Amino acid sequence: MEDMTQHITRDDIIDFIYQEARMLDEGRYDEWLSLWLESGIYWMPLDYKQSDPINATSLLYEDHFMLRLRVERLNGARTFSQKPKSRCHHVLQRPFVDVFEPLEGRFQTNTSVHYVETRLDEQILLALTVTHDLKIDDGKLKIAGKKVELLNSDAAFGNIQLLP
Amino acid sequence: MGHSDDIRALFQGYQVHRDVYISNDIYEFEMKHLFANTWVFLGHDSQTPNKGDYYTTQIGDQPVIMVRHTDDQIHVLLNRCPHKGTKIAIDRTGNTGKFFRCPYHAWSFKTDGCLLAIPLKKGYQDTGFENNQNTKGMTPVGAVKNYRGFIFARLNPEGVGFEEFFGDSLSTLDNMVDRAPEGRLEVAGPPLRYMHRCNWKMLLENQTDTCHPMVAHESSAGTAIKIFEEMGSPSPRPPAMQIIAPFMSPYEFFEGMGIRTWPNGHGHTGVNMSIHSDYDAIPGYFEAMCDAYGEEKAKTILDDNRHNTIYFPNIMAKGPLQQIRNFIPLAADKTLVESWVYRLVGAPDQLIAMSSMYNRMINAPTSIVGHDDLEMYERAQEGLRTNSSDWVNLQRLYGEDEDYSKEAVENGTTERQMRNQFDAWVKFMTYDMDKTTAEQT
């Protein structure tokens, strides 16, 4: 990928968000992990409008080690809850680019998503608001943070096994 | 079915009949008898700190409201208007002020359940209305106990007292609360809510099943260790290594952990040490404990690293992590698991951060550890439909002379605690059964 620092546009940011979702839907997890800064955190709050991810329970608050573990586990020989495997599908509304600061290499998007996950005869639909914090690192866009807010985060769920 | 002998026949020493997990009739008897005769966990009094604060939950299949009354005591009322049956409160938590008011016909009740007012009351004159039992107000449960902040209730007015029911098992809750320098806990946010399509007792049994972690959780704990080693075993270790990696400990580790059982179905793993023993020290915490208790007592409190404590019938407590998991039965094949964490008042924030991290890594519907547990329960729920055998085996380290009325400490891989639970299950299923049947016939 060419160095994006000089000429980055809002469309580049939006394309990046779509590409990330496509990697998850197609199970291209190694590519997906390479989108992340090592310091990036994937946060899924438990409480509606939760502000503190650390000192109260979240659904997910995962560093690079946990994300790598999550992804490697999916392909393990003894990953029983993934025999058979789940599949997922993201439908994105066009992201809002809420922060666009190319000189600082800092961007933030807000995206409405319908997320479908299925396994065997079961299928769930979740409505999400996703906030991406992006940075330019070594000339490429990277995910510095991803917050996934479920519309019904306080509902009781069965397994949610892949990544909304 | 419905006589105590039929219930007793379902548990035979080292095996239990599959109907206890899959039969709708047995489930209905559990709701009517087991969950009415036992002390059932409701919540923590810090969930309702002010007068009029309430929290809605259920005891077995009975919807209840836990509310702080004007006398500052916690009362527990059945969540039903005595008039038409309308649920009085449907939000999970709120404040009702000095009284509840039914939204259907505006009957109102004090927060201890007593009838306060009925609109247009003259319409009931000379109707004999005052003799109707439904006019007494909202019905309180049989008995309520606030034990160091934890609220338990028994539906039946008559039955075994709180101290007799729990006995020495209360030492785990004591240890959890004693770990706070100020000697009290506060609830930290809402619980994880995880729906399981399996019987509630499968979850209960799994809490002291020390032969499954290294098998069922190899995909998460084993992979964590593999990645850590590929990274060159960095220090400090990633947080997940503290929490998830010990699940891969060998059988010998779990044998050495030990299991203790108490009468009435209570018991715990981790008598000598546990998978929670090797967590990193949190700066400032030991000092705060020494200031509060003196060094010797602080050490005694913190050296107790029990793993999972079952409070029969349906909760598990983790003392070292200030956590309670509530296995709420919804049907023979459906259980809602709520996992709570509590803040140690007076302790550094890193402790609640650790408890919250454990909760999301292990107990969430998004947890890679929880996924494999739920997979096993749901496969068992389906597999038990097969007619090849009526019996589920609980025979590991079984002795014919086991006496569940006495406390015992044994090898940490025994299934004695599961047998202990079924011994209590029979006791409290049948406790009022013959009496009830006699009244009906």
Image (cartoon, helix red, strand yellow):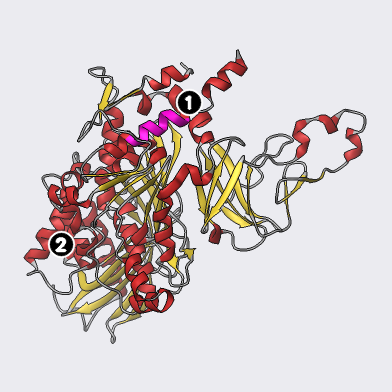
Kind of residue indicated by mark 1: Thr
Say the numbered circle drawn on residue B398: none
Q: Which residue is mark 2?
A: A31
Q: Could you tell whether A108 is left or right of B228 in the image?
A: right
Question: Disc 2 is attached to a residue of which chain?
Answer: A
Seen from the viewer's position, the closer of residues A140 and B402 is: B402
The residue located at (50%, 35%) in the rendering is B35
The residue located at (88%, 41%) in the rendering is B120
Relative to A21, is B140 above or below? above
Mark 2 Cα shell of 10 Å, populated few (<14), some (14-19), many (≥20): few
What span is in magenta? Answer: B420-428
Seen from the viewer's position, the closer of residues A81 and A133 is: A81
Tell me, yes or no, whether the highlighted magenta stretch contains residue B242.
no
Q: Which residue is mark 1?
A: B430
- The reply to whether residue B338 is in sight is no
The residue located at (47%, 64%) in the rendering is B185
Question: Disc 1 is attached to a residue of which chain?
Answer: B
Residue B347, position as x, y percentages in the image: 41, 73
How many angstroms separate mark 1 from mark 2 (CA)?
Answer: 59 Å
Seen from the viewer's position, the closer of residues B40 and A102 is: B40
Residue B357, position as x, y percentages in the image: 32, 63
* SS type, badge 1: helix
The C terminus of chain B, quarter of image = top right
Marks 1 and 2 belong to one chain: no
Kind of residue indicated by mark 2: Glu
Tell me, yes or no, whether the highlighted magenta stretch contains residue B425.
yes
Q: Nearer the viewer, mark 1 or mark 2?
A: 1
Q: Could you tell whether B25 is left or right of A19 in the image?
A: right
Residue B422, position as x, y percentages in the image: 36, 32
Q: Main secondary structure of the magenta part?
A: helix
* SS type, badge 2: helix
Q: Could you tell whether B78 is left or right of B294 in the image?
A: right
